Image (tube, grey):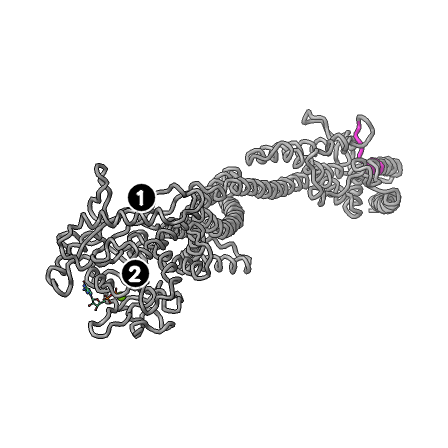
């Protein structure tokens, strides 16, 4: 007879639920396919918008028949010929007459009906245990309990039905005992009186029944604290009578139809507390969301069969935990679909060391988050409020920890990419400026690129902001980024300063090249100090060679300093940076001068200069007219004077000394004290200067020594030889001149 019940494990699609589903079988096992049934009948989607009715009553009193007529169900009924128990355990079916217009009133949607095995059956009379258990189960789940009763049983206080009702009342009190907050809803006991002949009006039957119920209520032992409770505290009552199905089939059908119209939502009239509308009052609802009904029912049944005290609030909490976890997993699938590929993309980019900024991450993340939380809220908020709140918090922190990691990765990438882009953009703009003739403003370039780069970062950071979510505020990251850009700017400015310094140094070198060469060339004219004063200027003197060199050097350096400082200030270098630059410039300039002088006093060069100097004095007279030697001339005298005069230059040339002080220039004062901003890298390409960098062990005297003692000696010897040669030649030419 259980052929209607499909095999377990075939999956919902393969199941046939034509006769409903056997929720509890005759072995008291719970059918785990209940959830499939609820999904197949689309009740699972209904939230709270469903109703559950159970029918109670003695065996073979036409309960199944009634339900089948009322709700179009197909519960098995006893055949007229073979009177044997049919309904076993508890069956459930969805109302199939939904939308049927029962007396112009539509039935409520999603009515689930439970056909409970008759309890006082001759066949199973010994099993009072099941009666109690099924009553508990029905009370824990159902809004309405239909009590099916023959008319002739009404008033038979000792009748089987009364035993059933006593059980119902007792287990109900037991439930309330566990629920001190009295959150347990009321229930409706709906008496349907069968085979109503009509001689006793329904109102009389009703009064009789109510009296009996009161009697039963007073007879049951009430738990401590509930001694004075009244039956009305827990139950409402409704009554209907139906004519004899076999004797008055048409009337029976008409009345059943009318009865169907009462299974719709309703409320109590404030005047006489009578039903307005149907019997489904909101207060009867067990508030178990439809998608949790099977888990809840299973939990309840489990408690019941294991003879544990049924604690509905705990059951509801357990259900909420179970379902919230389930829903959480479900909604996370949608989140994963969107977010996991992005996480993978980011991980891969990081692995490859690439700064990959994911497009539209903020919008995508916010949408995924919102969808996920909203979906959870829609389904899970129907469950126990406290559990729901906790689980929602857990879900949020789960998705947020992932989003947070993703977003932080995104900003790290944006940071990296931004710094690189900024550095490149500035460098390229400088290059372009240099190409175009060097008329670029470094500070402007930096300013413009910084703003551009900051804007991009800011947009990205702002796009990641989730309103009301503190961790998504990335202002600190923005500030960090800005700080880094400033550091990069400082570095780029330093590079720019270096380039500027190199340019200015080159300029100094080239100016020194000309100017120092010129001063040394003047040595070649031996008439320094005695030359014709026709120009009115003080003629250059050999004695003040170094003064002239020092002065021209100072003026070149001064001009270079002005150029450097002006330019550096234009790109907003700091005072300190400018100071360091100028300090470096002075040092490098001195070194350049020193090198330039070195070049001039290279052996061949200086010997040539001395020769020119000597010849000028020897071969030309005071008027600058070349001498024609005659034997009578005092060749020796002129020679000796010219030679000694030129020789006197050698000590002069050997040391860089100023005429006024007869001391080397004050290089310490010239270079100036080392500014505080000097870093070790600034000093890298700076050779030590004697007398300035004292720790280097070279004195100022050494620094300003142009010719060493040995070089000097050597030079004297060579010069003398050369001069002697000139003298001999002159002597010969004088004699020769006479001979001719
Ligand atoms: P259940 O065991 O309470 O579910 O009873 P069933 O629906 O299986 O019906 C038991 C027997 O009662 C069947 O033979 C039905 O034909 C008969 N029956 C059904 N409804 C009525 C009714 O309204 N009056 C009478 N007298 N018999 C009925
Ligand atoms: Mg039945």
* Picture coordinates of residue 305, whole percent (x, y): 43, 62
Tell whether position 654 is magenta: yes
Mark 1 CB near ligand 1 (8 Å cut): no
Give the foreground label among 2 and 1. 1
Residue 399 in the image: above or below residue 514: below
Residue 503 in the image: above or below residue 23: above
Find the magenta span and give its range: 649-659
The answer to whether one can see residue 337 in this image is no
Q: Residue at x 31, y 57 (%)?
A: 45
* Picture coordinates of residue 619, whole percent (x, y): 79, 39
Ligand 1 resides in the quarter of the picture at bottom left
The answer to whether 49 appears left or right of 341 in the picture is left
Dot 1 falls on a residue whose secondary structure is helix
Mark before the other along the chain sequence, 2 or 1? 2
The answer to whether one can see residue 604 in this image is yes
Quadrant housing residue 681: top right
Quadrant housing residue 147: bottom left
* Picture coordinates of residue 440, whole percent (x, y): 50, 40
Residue under pointer 1? 232
Dot 2 falls on a residue whose secondary structure is strand
Residue under pointer 2? 114
Given residues 371 and 356, the one toward you in this image is: 371
Q: Quadrant of the N terminus?
A: bottom left
Tell whether position 507 is magenta: no
Given residues 656 and 233, the one toward you in this image is: 233
Residue 630 in the image: above or below residue 331: above
């Amino acid at each position: 007879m259980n052929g209607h019940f499909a095999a377990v494990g075939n999956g919902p699609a393969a199941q046939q639920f034509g006769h409903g589903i056997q929720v509890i079988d005759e072995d008291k096992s719970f059918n785990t396919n209940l959830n499939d049934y609820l999904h197949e009948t689309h009740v699972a989607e209904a939230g709270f918008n469903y109703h559950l009715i159970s029918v109670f009553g003695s065996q073979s009193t036409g309960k199944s028949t009634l339900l089948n007529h009322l709700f179009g169900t197909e519960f098995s009924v006893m055949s007229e010929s073979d009177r044997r128990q049919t309904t076993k355990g508890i069956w459930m079916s969805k109302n199939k007459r939904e939308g049927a217009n029962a007396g112009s009133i539509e039935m409520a949607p999603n009515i689930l009906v439970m056909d409970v095995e008759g309890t006082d059956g001759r066949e199973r009379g010994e099993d009072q245990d099941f009666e109690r258990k099924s009553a508990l189960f029905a009370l824990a789940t159902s809004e309405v309990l239909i009590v099916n009763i023959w008319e002739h049983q009404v008033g038979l206080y000792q009748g089987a039905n009364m035993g059933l009702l006593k059980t119902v009342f007792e287990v109900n009190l037991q439930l309330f005992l566990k629920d001190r907050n009295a959150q347990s809803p009321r229930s409706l006991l709906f008496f349907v009186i069968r085979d109503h002949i009509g001689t006793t009006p329904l109102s009389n039957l009703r009064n009789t029944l109510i009296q009996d119920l009161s009697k039963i209520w007073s007879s049951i032992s009430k738990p401590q604290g509930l001694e004075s409770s009244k039956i009305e505290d827990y139950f409402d009552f409704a009554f209907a009578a139906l004519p004899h199905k076999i004797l008055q089939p048409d009337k029976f059908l008409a009345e059943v139809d009318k009865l169907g119209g009462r299974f719709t939502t309703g409320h109590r009239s404030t005047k006489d507390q009578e039903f307005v509308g149907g019997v489904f009052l909101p207060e009867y609802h067990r508030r178990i969301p439809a998608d949790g009904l099977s888990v809840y029912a299973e939990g309840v049944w489990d408690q019941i069969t294991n003879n544990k005290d049924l604690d509905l609030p705990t059951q509801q909490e357990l259900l909420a935990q179970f379902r919230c976890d389930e829903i959480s997993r479900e909604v996370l699938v949608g989140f994963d679909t969107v977010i996991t590929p992005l996480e993978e993309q980011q991980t891969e980019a990081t692995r490859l060391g690439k700064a990959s900024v994911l497009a539209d991450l903020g919008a995508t993340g916010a949408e995924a988050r919102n969808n996920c939380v909203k979906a959870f809220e829609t389904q899970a908020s129907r469950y126990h409020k406290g559990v729901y709140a906790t689980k929602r918090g857990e879900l949020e922190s789960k998705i947020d920890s992932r989003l947070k990691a993703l977003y932080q990765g995104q900003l790290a990438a944006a940071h990296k990419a931004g710094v690189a882009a900024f550095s490149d953009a500035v460098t390229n703009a400088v290059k372009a400026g240099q190409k175009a003739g060097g008329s670029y403003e470094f500070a402007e370039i930096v300013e413009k690129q910084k703003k551009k780069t900051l804007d991009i970062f800011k947009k990205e950071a702002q796009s990641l902001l989730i309103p009301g979510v503190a961790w998504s505020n990335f202002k600190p990251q923005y500030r960090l980024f800005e700080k880094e850009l400033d550091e990069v700017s400082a570095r780029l400015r330093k590079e720019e300063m270096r380039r500027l310094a190199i340019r200015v140094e080159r300029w100094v070198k080239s100016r020194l090249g000309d100017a120092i060469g010129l001063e040394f060339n003047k040595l070649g004219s031996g008439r320094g100090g005695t030359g014709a004063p026709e120009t009115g200027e003080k003629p250059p003197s050999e004695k003040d060679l170094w003064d002239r060199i020092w002065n021209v050097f100072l003026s070149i350096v001064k001009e270079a300093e002005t150029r450097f400082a002006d330019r550096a200030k234009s790109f907003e270098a700091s005072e300190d940076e400018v100071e360091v630059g100028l300090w470096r410039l002075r040092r490098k300039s001195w070194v350049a001068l020193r090198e330039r002088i070195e070049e001039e006093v290279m052996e061949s060069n200086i010997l040539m200069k001395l020769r020119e100097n000597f010849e000028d004095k020897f071969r030309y007279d005071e008027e600058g007219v070349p001498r024609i030697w005659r034997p009578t001339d005092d060749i020796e005298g002129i020679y000796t004077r010219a030679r000694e005069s030129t020789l006197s230059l050698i000590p002069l040339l050997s040391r860089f000394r100023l005429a006024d002080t007869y001391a080397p220039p004050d290089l310490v004062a010239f270079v100036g004290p080392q500014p505080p901003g000097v870093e070790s890298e600034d000093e890298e390409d700076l050779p030590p200067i004697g007398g300035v960098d004292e720790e280097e062990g070279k004195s100022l005297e050494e620094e300003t020594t142009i010719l060493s003692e040995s070089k000097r000696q050597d030079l004297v010897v060579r010069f003398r030889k050369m001069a002697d040669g000139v003298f001999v030649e002159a002597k010969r030419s004088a004699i020769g001149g006479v001979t001719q």
